[in-house]
Image (cartoon, rainbow, N blue to C red):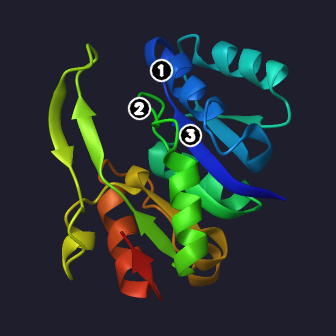
Amino acid sequence: MKKITVVMPVYNTEIYLEKSIQSVLSQDIGQENFILIAINDGSTDKSLEILHSYEKKYPNCIKVVNQENQGVGKARNVGIELADSKYISFLDSDDYYEVDFLSKHVKKAEETDADVIISGFRRITSEGKVLRIYSPSSPQRYTKYSTMSSCNRIYRLDFLKRKKILFFENTFVEDTPFCLSIIAQGRSMDL
């Protein structure tokens, strides 16, 4: 069993997709410790072709699922259903991880036995200019509410499955209800 599953919904992001996949493959936690489940959500560009080329090259750590377009919430829920690891994280196919994202989060989860580990993130332009930095650097009571993104966290998978926490489907605002459910039902969280 892998330590962590990275779920990546993909829809027409061919220009960003390779950078996103490479950021997962380059994680210093080691490829033997994670699996990337990429859900192609009915892309009409070359995204599926790119995904299959990576899956063929890295069959031990990349799994591709192809489905008709059903939205990011449904794609993430498919990833939750298929995941078989201790932890799970979500990464949008036009975003990327820093090289130590998974290792730092897994280490903190192991140290604290938390259901969720939350970190900061940066909003940047396609040219790399930092627009804004979100940082829960001062662990205060309300810090967990400061960002409602599902992508700056890792989750204990059995917690999500046991509590039946899923993303809203057929909506554009799927992160906020998911994050609020996590906060409401979480036994423990760490920043």
N-terminal label among 1 and 2: 1
Give the percent coordinates (x, y) of residue 24.
59, 34
Query: In the image, 176: left or right of 77?
Result: left
| Amino acid type of the residue that numbered disc 3 sits on in the rendered structure | Met
Q: Which mark is residue 8?
A: 3
Circle 2 is placed at which residue position?
95
Q: Amino acid at mark 2?
A: Asp
> Residue 16: percent from the left, percent from the top?
45, 18
In the rendered image, the vertical position of residue 87 relative to residue 158, given as above or below: above
Measured in 3D between alpha carbons, the distance from the residue under mark 1 to the one under mark 3, in whole angstroms, is 13 Å
The answer to which image quadrant residue 113 occupies is bottom right
Residue 191 coordinates in the image, percent (x, y): 36, 69
Decide: few, some or many residues near mark 3? Use Cα within 10 Å; few <14, some 14-19, many ≥20.
Answer: many
CA gap, disc 2 and disc 3: 10 Å
- Where disc 3 sits, the SS reads strand
Q: Label 1, on which residue?
A: 12
Which is in the foreground here, disc 1 or disc 3?
Answer: 3
Mark nearer the viewer, 1 or 2: 2
Q: Measuring 75% from the left and 15% from the top, which residue is drawn there? A: 53
Residue at screen point 26% across, 13% down: 127
Closer to the camera in the image, 110 or 45: 110
- Name the element at disc 2: loop
The amino acid beneath tag 1 is Asn
